[in-house]
Amino acid sequence: MTTEPPRRPILKLKSGVTPKLPPELVRKPAPPPPPPVLDVWWKCKPCGKAFTPAPDAADDEAVRCPNCNARLGLAGEFRTDPTPSRVRARLIRKS
């Protein structure tokens, strides 16, 4: 027979009450990382928005305009040289 001390009651917060921390203990969010340097820019033919396709997209993945969501072609078609005529975007800058 063991003699254990009595258990302490579990503390509970009232609903809707959030604990307040002193300002020196509150973490500030880290600034966002700088955007990557983009070396190829395309222009959507339907709306004219400049964009760059994702470099890690699979060759058979569809590329869509970030502005109007038009399907512009397949990612593999954007990597070929010369670009096929069925791509609905125009190359505007390549570094």
Image (cartoon, helix red, strand yellow):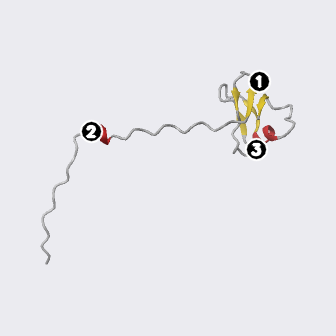
Label 2–label 3 contact, CB within 8 A: no
Residue picked out by circle 3? 60
Residue picked out by circle 1? 45
The disc labelled 2 sits on which kind of residue? Pro
Q: CA distance from mark 2 to mark 3?
A: 52 Å
Seen at 65% across and 26% down, the residue is 67
Task: Kindly give the residue lying farthest to the bottom in the view shown.
Answer: 1
Check disc 3: other Cα within 10 Å, few if <14, some if 14-19, many if 20+: few
Residue 71 location (% of width, % of height): 73, 31
Q: Quadrant of residue 1?
A: bottom left
Residue picked out by circle 2? 22
Q: Looking at the image, is mark 2 or mark 3 nearer the viewer?
A: 2
Check disc 2: other Cα within 10 Å, few if <14, some if 14-19, many if 20+: few
Q: Please, is residue 84 above or below residue 43 in the view?
A: below
Seen at 70% across and 26% down, the residue is 50
Q: Please, is residue 59 above or below residue 92 in the view?
A: below
The disc labelled 1 sits on which kind of residue? Lys
Q: Quadrant of residue 46?
A: top right
* Total residue callouts: 3
> Which numbered disc flags the more N-terminal residue, 1 or 3?
1
